[in-house]
Image (tube, helix red, strand yellow):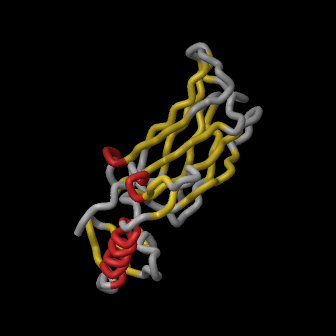
């Protein structure tokens, strides 16, 4: 199969007397290549798996780029924003949760909180990745999270090295547990 030079379409056109471009013989070559590519897509088996990704052929005439591609990530995720005021337990707005259970927050002590899952979700601490941050640009404030059991994650907020409340305001978190 020949390749179409997509970076130099000018070779498929020529200048006419008025300076405008007109298509020349290579247009037939372009149509032949698109048709061959479409035939390839149309003849894909019902479901082809390549590197864990399932591809199904479903192209339409001269639309060779239409293919249904789906791949499940190899982790479960909880993405949320967290806020905390006074001595209340933090609250969160869940943006995405693929764990199948919804965790709740507990207030433990000043600057210490725990995110508790109703069932075991952590089976191997080495497969847990956690991102947490305090927004607002405070260089002396820190928000960290660490798994402490198969159902719990400890969260701590420090200001100038000391535990502190009232520093979580829509703080983003993401917890991934890899398979």
Q: Residue at x 33, y 81 (%)?
A: 39
| Residue 161 lies in quadrant | top right
Residue 34: x %, y % from top left: 38, 72
Identify the image quadrant of the C terminus.
bottom left
Farthest left residue in view? 1
> Going by the image, does 54 lie left or right of 78?
left
Residue 160: x %, y % from top left: 60, 13
> Going by the image, does 153 lie left or right of 44?
right
Observer-nearest of 148 and 14: 14
Residue 36 vs 133, above or below: the answer is below
Observer-nearest of 91 and 48: 48
Residue 169 vs 32, above or below: the answer is above
Residue 58 vs 107, above or below: the answer is below
Observer-nearest of 37 and 45: 37
Q: Residue at x 71, y 35 (%)?
A: 169
| Residue 1 lies in quadrant | bottom left
Residue 51: x %, y % from top left: 26, 64
Q: Residue at x 34, y 55 (%)?
A: 5
Q: Residue at x 37, y 72 (%)?
A: 28
Residue 161 vs 136, above or below: the answer is above
> Going by the image, does 66 lie left or right of 79?
left
């Amino acid at each position: 199969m020949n390749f179409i030079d997509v970076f130099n379409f000018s070779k498929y056109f020529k200048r006419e007397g008025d300076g405008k471009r007109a298509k020349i013989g290579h247009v037939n070559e372009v149509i032949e290549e698109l048709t061959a590519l479409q035939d390839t897509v149309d003849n894909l088996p019902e479901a082809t798996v390549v590197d864990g990704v399932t591809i199904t052929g479903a192209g339409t005439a001269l639309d060779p780029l239409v293919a249904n591609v789906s791949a499940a990530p190899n982790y479960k995720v909880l993405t949320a924003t967290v806020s905390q005021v006074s001595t209340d337990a933090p609250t969160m707005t869940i943006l995405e949760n693929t764990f199948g259970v919804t965790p709740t927050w507990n207030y433990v002590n000043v600057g210490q909180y725990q995110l508790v899952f109703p069932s075991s979700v952590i089976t191997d601490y080495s497969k847990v990745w956690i991102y947490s941050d305090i927004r607002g640009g405070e260089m002396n404030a820190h928000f960290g999270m660490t798994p402490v059991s198969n159902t719990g994650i400890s969260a701590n907020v420090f200001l100038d090295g000391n535990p502190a409340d009232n520093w979580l305001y829509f703080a983003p978190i993401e917890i991934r547990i890899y398979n």
